[in-house]
Amino acid sequence: MPVHLLGISCSPRTDSNSTALLSASLKRAAETYGDDFTSELIELRTVPIEACKDCDVCGKRKDDGRFLDCVQKGKDGVQEVLDKMVAADGFVFATPVYFGLPSDLYSRFIMRTRVLRHQDFRLANHVAGVMAIAARRSGGAETTIMATWLPLLRNGCLIVGNGDATCQYGAMAWASGRGHVLTDEWGMEQGYQVVERVYSVARLIKAGADMLGFSSPMTFDYVAGTRP
Ligand SMILES: Cc1cc2nc3c(=O)[nH]c(=O)nc-3n(C[C@H](O)[C@H](O)[C@H](O)COP(=O)(O)O)c2cc1C
């Protein structure tokens, strides 16, 4: 089975730098890894996303023991993306830097993954890497990358940076106008390296999980760690 990666572009813009960087990086990986690599790119700007309501229904079970769905399932486009995340071996997020943080689109979407955390960590052991696009040098690319990691870590994802010779925190691209990132040679290279690293680690995890025959090693307990 090929390693399947989901690219998630978190820019609200059409023809965004985030999508251009992600798309070129995934394309290059497909050329490099051939049949062992598949991917899909989702632009969050095209997905209707309601905010998490904090209703705390997720994680509770029906009488037959199955988990209840998110109360917003079917009311917007989020469940479809969540299903794709569970099915993928790894994720690559590309986000514009907004005030040193990932885009509000990223935040709105990622809060909705709480249902997967509450359903025994369905994103556990999925590998994740981040690309950030900033208009300014020292404009907050690294704080953005690290802030993007936090909800992923709480979901049990395995965070990686970029690979090859540099092993940095991810990709920092430098661009402003639409498509400007395509002229940032080093940013484009780093973007590819993030995909390469996510692919390599996901491949190891997949092989190990197949050999050992386990899926998620974690069980969510609503009560543990909270005050009674
Ligand atoms: C609300 C907002 C906040 C921004 N904040 C920053 C910032 O803190 N640092 C920075 O370097 N660029 C900042 N930018 C510029 C974008 O990160 C930059 O234009 C980027 O290339 C946009 O990527 P996109 O085309 O994928 O949306 C900001 C842009 C917007 C709209």
Image (spheres, rainbow, N blue to C red):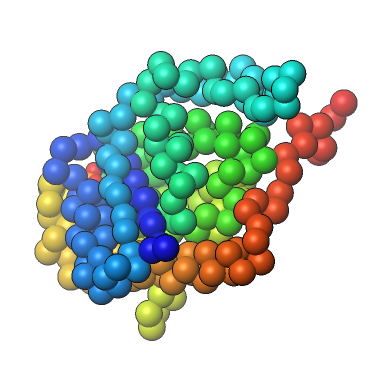
Figure quadrant, ligand 1? top left
Establish if 163 lies above or below 2: below
* Quadrant housing the N terminus: bottom left
**Residue at screen point 16% across, 38% down:** 14
Q: Is residue 64 left or right of residue 71?
A: right
Q: What residue appears at the point 52 percent right and 64 percent down from the top-left corner?
A: 206
In what quadrant of the picture does the C terminus appear? Answer: top right
Q: Position of residue 116 (x, y in %)?
A: 57, 37
- Left or right of residue 7, residue 147 in this image: right
Q: Nearer the viewer, residue 56 or 147?
A: 56
Residue 9 seen in this snapshot? no
Q: Is residue 194 above or below residue 15?
A: below
x and y percent of residue 222 in the render? 76, 32
Q: How many marks?
A: 0
Please say whether residue 46 is visible from this viewpoint.
yes
Residue 166 spot, x, y in % from top left:
39, 79
Q: Is residue 76 above or below residue 38?
A: above
Depth order, front residue of 116/159: 116
Lateral position of residue 136 relative to residue 118, left or right: left
Q: Residue at x 44, y 71 (%)?
A: 200
The answer to whether 165 is drawn above or below residue 127 in the figure is below
**Residue 222 or residue 1, whichever sits in front:** 1
Q: Quadrant of residue 80?
A: top left
State the residue lying farthest toward the right. Answer: 228
Percent position (x, y) of residue 34? 26, 70
